[in-house]
Structures are given as structure tokens and as C-alpha cells.
Amino acid sequence: MTGKEQLESVPLQEKLDVTCVEGEVVKPQWSNKFQCIIALLGFSVGLGNLWRFPYVCQRNGGGIGFSIMTISCLIVPYYSMVFAWALYYIYSSFATVLPWTTCGNAWNTRQCVAVGALRGGINRSTEIDGTISNLTEYLAVKEVSGEANISSGATKAFGHTATEEFWQYKVLGISSGIEDVGTVQLHLLICWFLTCLFLFLCIMKGIRSLGKVVYVTALMPYILLTVLLIRACMMPGSLDGILYYVTPDFNRLQQSQVWLEAILQVFFSVGPAWGTIITMSSHNSPHNNIVRDSILVTLLGELTSVFSGFVVFATVGFLAHDLGQPVADVITSGPGIGFIVYPEAVSLLPFSHLWSVLFFLIVLMMGVDTTFGNIEAALACIEDVLPRRFHVKHLQTILAALFMSLVFLSGLPYTTNAGVYMFQLFDWYVAAVACFLIGTLECLVVGWCYGMKRFAADVEAMIGKRLPVIYKLMCFIVVPALLMVAMGLAVASYKPPTYGGYEYPYFAVIIGWCIALSSVVPIPVTFVMQILDERGSLAQRVESAMTPNSDWARCRRRYDVHERTNCTMKDNALFLFNQ
């Protein structure tokens, strides 16, 4: 039996986490091709598709391995905190009266205005600390607005909706700033523990358990979104919201910011630089059609963004109609749309408790698959760097338990009164540089260092087809160029982090840049270490460090892919337009 036949005949082991063929580790495979597709789709379709893509449309009229491991480890704790918030909203949805619809609660201020108090845009006035204010002046919902702050006594003259105050003062228990950490809040601590426990149970056996979970978490959001869309379309004002969404403003196409944000939306939505797609795909058969899967997942992911936009704008249109406000003044981005705008909108619907539970279930499921992917990427990197003697029975479960324990501990600061400030700081910086750089280097290293000839031969051996010229041009020239331009524009337009009206102190900005660079540093460090391990002159060491090792060459020969020695820059450039 040939090595190739041996590899393809290896069954999915139930007792051991890994198997070996000719001394090489072979990963378990998905039960079927559909599992990988929906797992990748679930990763690509995250919370950004639900609460960032619609806002972008409204506003615009329409060593790498170690870096991947680092950025995955950084992302999981802060991104998972959204689930803890959503869990608390689901719990609160079972109250007799939705707690974010009324004032007079312990967390409310004197400026609080109950949901529906201004229904129909009726112009009312109220006296607040001797100041006559028009309640309609604050109706434009702000993105996770931090204008009012109970602990600092800096509450503005104008009030806030009950929905906003529930989010700020009850759920977050927000303090005066990142310096005022406060204490761990019990309700968030409980929700955070349940979140980590759920994630561990889902990934404790790797793709064996994950492959079954994604059937629910990746597909159920489409059913729930469809139900919410049908219900929203039955409410007055929904058509106005949808028309606002689908009506293009072609004048905006002249602005570079529109194109930049379009690139950023697709890039961060699909997530090609996070390492998750590589990790998930590594569990496929060697002859899986990767070209088909990549096109399918990308199209389905972005079409989901468009579909989510209809759901969001239909609901926001109804809310705008109920408040007597323009749609543009109601739509927002980020957690603001998930924890302020949408809860207020569903509270105005009949059977509001049911719609509230359904919406936050969507938030949970659309985000959990992305987290699954990041966890799996981190665990795969850790498993790959572990010496062979540590590849023991139940290795995946042991690593998952240790990893999620560390995630739980590192996420505890987010449960404090200053947690949302830390969350915003991480969100501001964690992918500011790393993802652009990783994505660019992946294209350049594969295309120009490993060599297009080698890569094309590998792909042809896998799928039996040659790479088209357009693919080589896009992957090895256009995409890295666009990513570098996007990174340059993003850095040039950099602004210090803010949260509503709060400006972060200087030390927090320094911490933020340390976060941004922490996942980039492993790239030059690993490269230098690799060069030092080689022998010969500096030029010989660099060349040797950039040449595939003997293990990879042996793996390629197993699939009858012969080594190509001529992979110079000139050869790669000529190969762009030749087969």
C-alpha cells in the first residue's frame, strides 16, 4: 500500500486524538464535506455581519503561525464576553416586564425616559434639575453611548432611554473610566462562567464534537433571522427602512473611505488572516476542492451580511416610524445596535419577550461559531508546537480544558465596572496591524518565497486542475497590494480610542499599541531564530530558512509532486501568465 493510500485509509480514531503515518501526524477528518462548509460559514458569519455591515451600508451608501496563535488567544476572551452580555439579556427577557422598557428601577437616573414615552414623535418637555429640555433631542441613539456616568456625577442635562440606561448601568455597571476598575459584578461573573463552560463542552473533542454543534449554531441563525424579518415586515415603517437600505448613493463611490471600509468589511468578515480557515480546512481530505469551497464560503458569508441588513433595517425602520425620527438617526454600529437599538425595537412588538429571546439567541449563535474557529486555531497551533511525546490520549480535551481555564481567568477584568472600557480598548487595537500584516505575508511568502510553481503544483495534485491566471494575479499581487494600502490608510486615519464622550488616558493608549504589536512581534523574532539555527553565510542561512524542509518535500512526493528547484523571483513572475 502506497503512502497516499495509507493516508486516505486512516479512519477517524475514537480513542486517540492523533494518528501517525510513516512517522507523521495525521489529523482527524470531518465526517462529511458539509460539516467543513458550515463550520467555515459559521466562522465567517459573525456578529459583524449583523451589527456592522448594515451600518457601513448606511454610512457609505451602500512566523505567521505564532502570530496567528497569539492573535487567536487575544481575541477569544474579549470576543466571548459578548455572549455573557447576551446571556444576561436572555435571562432578563423572562421577567414579567422587560426591564429595559421601564424607568423607576434601582439603576435608572432621574433623566430616564421609558420606551414608548415619545411614541409618534410627540414633542414633550420635562424639567430636569431646573433645566427645561426637549426629550426629542436625545432620540438619536448613539453607539454604546457613554455620555452619562453615575459614579462620576457627570450625567448630562438630557436624559437617556430606559434601554440605554439598562445597558449602561445595570448590565455593564459602568464606572467613570478605565482607571476606576471597581469590582467584579456577580451577574456578569455567572454569565461569563456559563459562557466558558459552554465553549469548552463544544470544543472538548475537537472537530468530533464541533462538527455536530455547527449543524445547530451555523444553520439556526438563518431560520431565526427569517422569522424576525417576516415579523418586522408586518410592522409600520419597515418598508421605509428597507428602501433606505437598498437605495444607493452613487456619489459616495467617489470617496476613498467607502472603498476602504468595503475592503475592511469583507476582509474581517471572511477572516482569511485569522488562521481559522487554514485550521478547519486541514481536517479535510487532501483532495478536497479548496477552490470551490473558498468561493462558496465567501459568497454565502457576504450574502448573509446583505440578508442581515434587511432584518436590521426593517426593524430600525419600524422603530424610526414609532419614534417619528429619520432612519439615519436611529441606525448605529457595534454593540449599540445589539444591546440598545434592537432591544428597544422588539420591546414595541406584540409578544416582545419572545422576540427578545429569539434575537439574543441569534447574537449567541452568530458569534459562537467565530469563537469556535478562533479557539480551534489556537489549540491547533499549540498542538503543532508540542513535542511528539505529549501527543497522548485525550490531548484535545486536556488542551481545551487548560485553554478555557486561562480564557476564563483572563476574561474576569471584563466583568468589572470598567470592563466595557477594556473591551473597547481591545476591540480598537487587537486587529489594527496584525491581520493586515499576516494576510499580506501569507500571500507574499506563499507566492514569492515558497514559489508559485510549487503552490500551483500542490493545488493541481489536490484538485486535478491548474490555477487560472486571474487567481494567481489576485492572490499574489492584487490582494497583498490592497491589504498594504488598507493598512496604510488605517494607520494614517488613526485616532485615539474613545467610548462615547470618554477619552482614554495616555497609559491606556500605550497598552493598546502593545496589544496591537504583540501578535506581530513573533514574526521577526521567529525569522531571526530560524536564521540563527541554519549554517553558512548570512545569505545561505536566509535562503535555507526560506526553503521547504525535507519533511514537506517527502509529503509532496507522496502525492507524486516532484520538487521544482527553479523558484526564483524571475521564474515566479514569468509563471504568473504561463502554466
Image (cartoon, rainbow, N blue to C red):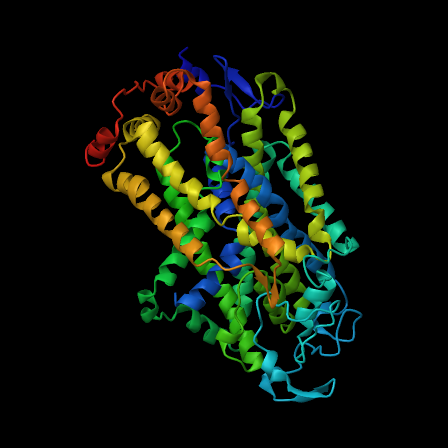
For the N terminus, the image quarter is top left
Residue sitting at x 44%, y 68%: 58
Q: Position of residue 230 (x, y in %)?
A: 52, 66
Query: Is the residue 291 above or below the residue 264 in the image?
Result: above
Q: For this rendering, which residue is in front, 344 or 525?
A: 525
Vertical order, 462 against 389 (above or below): below
Q: In the image, is 449 to the left or to the right of 147?
A: left
User: Looking at the picture, how far across and down is residue 224, in whole percent?
Assistant: 56, 57
Q: Nearer the viewer, residue 492 or 568?
A: 492
* Closer to the camera in the image, 215 or 560: 560
* Image position of 186 with respect to 198: above or below: below
Q: How many marks?
A: 0
Q: Is residue 280 left or right of residue 477?
A: right
Percent of width and height locating residue 522? 51, 34
- Whether residue 32 is visible to the viewer of this picture, yes or no, is no
Rendered residue at 64%/53% (across/down):
422
Quarter residue 443 falls in? top left
Seen at 51% across and 64% down, the residue is: 311
In the image, 430: left or right of 575? right
- Quarter that holds the C terminus: top left
Q: Position of residue 313 (x, y in %)?
A: 49, 68
Q: Is residue 191 visible?
A: yes
